[in-house]
Image (cartoon, helix red, strand yellow):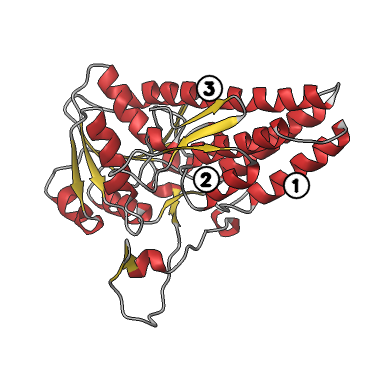
Amino acid sequence: MRTIEWKDGTVVIIDQRKLPNEEVWLELKNSDEMAFAIKEMLVRGAPLIGVSAAYGLALAAFHSNAKTREDLMTELETAAKLLRTTRPTAVNLFWAIDRVLDVAKKTSGTKEDLAKAVVTEANKMADEDVEANKKMGAFGAQLIEDGDTILTHCNAGSLATVDYGTALGVVRGAIDAGKNVKVISCETRPRMQGAKLTCYELMRDNIDVTLISDTMVGYVMSNGLVDKVVVGADRIVRDAVLNKIGTYNVAVLAAEHGIPFYVAAPMSTMDQTKTSAEAVIEERRPTEVTNIGSERIAPQGIKVLNPAFDITPLAYVDAVITEKGILYPEILLQKT
């Protein structure tokens, strides 16, 4: 499923808030609408957030009424500033904005030439994401045995990317290689991306999937029901992986039970400029925890902690699967 597409000056997305009950496609017409879509999680997942930001700049360029090239660059910088405020943790957002702005600055000619270059670059990035995911899937399939059951957390599939997926791309890569695999999906509280999105897309593709609550991870591992763990990432810093809240719990339990823990992410998710101590963890609204849908489940006035992501030290990561190949963290090499 291609989750985002440029069509004659609009960007078409699937509204992931509506899944799995409704498949609603929206047309975004300007960078403000794209910023809203990213912030409110109509689109989500680090790779898709990056491409969405690139398309946000493409919309700004395509619909600009700027008189000069310089005025258009000013408008792009303004749009970029807004887009940068939407989600602080996923590094792909900032990578994509910087890449598009760099192309714009290096493009000579008229404002029309500049606008065309921005749109072309955004489309190029979308196509690159699909190809990167397929390469990642092929590399990751080498780590998967025929008959494996793979546990995953959150959604790192086609819905978190332009298409194919990162962690679920590894599942698809293994299936494409002729291997019989099954998936266990954690529900992923509080927004339930595993239950809503991972289960939706795997069932849509006729891939065997079983849903569990987040509190069942230790149970399924201790009962020998999991062979491998494959998750995605929102940012990989020098000493850790930042991913959906609950990933750290899964990694610790996998280590306790001797289960390989793999992270699948494109090179654009790498951030070697920071350590985990310097990373910003997004704190989301309390109602995601106090409510299920429109129904409140917690008492009024309760204090709420709701970080969207947690930090998994590389000591718990057996390998990082990228489109360039399989990377083994140095700390792991030192242990072996």
For label 2, count other residues whose C-alpha is less than 10 Å away and answer few (under 14), some (14-19) or many (20+).
Answer: many
Q: Secondary structure at mark 2?
A: strand
Residue at numbered disc 1: 78
Residue 180 sits above or below residue 221 on the image: above
From the viewer's perspective, is 191 left or right of 270? left
For label 1, count other residues whose C-alpha is less than 10 Å away and answer few (under 14), some (14-19) or many (20+).
Answer: some
* x, y percent for residue 73: 81, 37
How far apart in space, not on screen, are marks 3 and 2 (Cα)? 21 Å
Q: Secondary structure at mark 1?
A: helix
Q: At label 2, which amino acid type do we have?
A: Arg
Please tell me which residue lies in front, 55 or 28.
Answer: 28
Q: Secondary structure at mark 3?
A: helix
Residue at numbered disc 3: 127
Please tell me which residue lies in front, 301 or 155.
Answer: 301
Residue at numbered disc 2: 235
* Residue 49 visible, this angle: yes
**Tally of numbered tags:** 3
From the viewer's perspective, is 137 left or right of 84? left
Label 3 or label 2, whichever comes before in sequence order: 3
Which residue is at 61% across, 34% downward?
55
Q: Which image quarter holds the N terminus?
A: top left
* x, y percent for residue 139: 39, 23
How far apart in space, not on screen, are marks 2 and 1 (Cα)? 25 Å
Q: At label 3, which amino acid type do we have?
A: Asp
- Contact between labelled residues 1 and 2, with CB atoms less than 8 Å apart: no
Which residue is at 70% across, 44% downward?
80
Which residue is at 36% across, 81% downward?
300
